[in-house]
């Protein structure tokens, strides 16, 4: 009787819901929380913090990087932007997700999908609410119509490559391969972030916002694909 009661209580606590529906609900809640945090961060910057020393320092970094520009560095920075364009992110993500689905690794595929979906949705909402001008320096690339805060390229690179590293790590047994995967997962977003600031497309604080967005999207995705369901407790 006690075991039956405990089973009933567990089922009541964790309703029997399809894993896709569970992931969607967690993703929605996570995106809401991350969005509130990011919008709060952005509005704090634009409504006050950037009017003081932080704002002057933020602009001075872009000014200093302009003084360091040289044709070879400009070409490298262009590569950093290209690898994190919307098209590049979609192509790499689609290939990885398709590969996981073919191998029936549904949680790994779901991890990447949720991370990128949360990142993209929160990014779009934030740029509508937080209106921040781009750096007042010559820019090396055309400016998209979105706000400078946060850097969408950087946030997307974090969500994509770190979620891929999280998905691959349990499947890889050689330690040096794991180290290489994580080295790339960290290096690529860092390269993208530096390239975007160097090109005059974003401030350092925009990249900081992208870090918050990327990490929040990843945390949401991890919870979404591991959220307990009734069948996990039987």
Image (cartoon, helix red, strand yellow):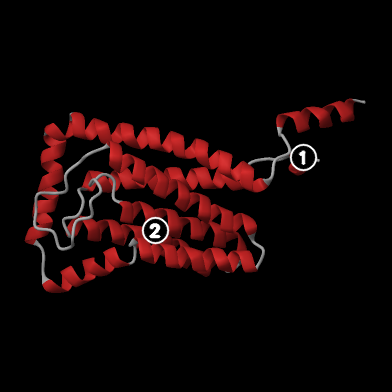
Whether residue 162 is situated above or below residue 58 in the rendered picture: below
Residue 74 in view (yes/no): yes
Q: Secondary structure at mark 2?
A: helix
Which one is in front in this view, the residue at disc 2 or the one at disc 1?
A: 1
Looking at the picture, does residue 189 appear above or below residue 29? below
SS at mark 1?
helix
**Left or right: 151 with respect to 217?**
left
Q: Residue 44 sits in which quadrant?
A: top left
Q: Quadrant of the C terminus?
A: top right
Q: Quadrant of the N terminus?
A: top right
Write the residue at 38% across / 32% down. Answer: 36
Q: Which corner quadrant of the image does residue 229 belong to?
A: top right
Percent across and percent down for residue 61 are 14, 50
Q: Which mark is residue 186?
A: 2
Which residue is label 1 attached to?
Answer: 233
Assess disc 1: are there few (<14), some (14-19) or many (≥20) residues with their C-alpha within 10 Å of its C-alpha: few
In the rendered image, residue 199, in percent from the top left (x then y), is placed at 17, 60
């Amino acid at each position: 009787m006690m075991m039956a009661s405990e089973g009933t209580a567990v089922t009541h606590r964790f309703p029997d819901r399809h894993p896709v529906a569970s992931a969607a609900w967690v993703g929605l809640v996570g995106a809401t929380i991350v969005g509130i945090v990011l919008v709060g961060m952005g509005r704090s910057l634009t409504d006050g913090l950037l009017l003081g020393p932080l704002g002057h320092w933020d602009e001075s970094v872009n000014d200093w990087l302009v003084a360091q520009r040289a044709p070879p560095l400009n070409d490298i920075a262009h590569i950093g932007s290209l690898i994190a364009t919307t098209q590049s992110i979609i192509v790499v993500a689609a290939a990885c997700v398709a590969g996981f689905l073919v191998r029936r690794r549904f949680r790994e595929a779901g991890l990447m999908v949720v991370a990128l979906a949360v990142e993209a949705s929160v990014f779009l909402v934030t740029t509508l609410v937080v209106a921040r001008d781009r750096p007042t320096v010559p820019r090396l690339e055309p400016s998209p119509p979105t706000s400078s805060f946060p850097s969408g390229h950087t946030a997307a690179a974090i969500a994509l490559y770190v979620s891929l590293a999280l998905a691959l790590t349990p499947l890889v047994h050689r330690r040096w391969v794991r180290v290489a995967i994580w080295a790339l997962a960290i290096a690529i977003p860092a390269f993208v972030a530096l390239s975007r600031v160097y090109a005059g497309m974003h401030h350092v604080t925009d990249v900081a916002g992208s870090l918050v967005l990327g990490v929040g999207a990843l945390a949401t995705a991890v919870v979404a694909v591991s959220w307990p369901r009734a069948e996990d407790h039987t």
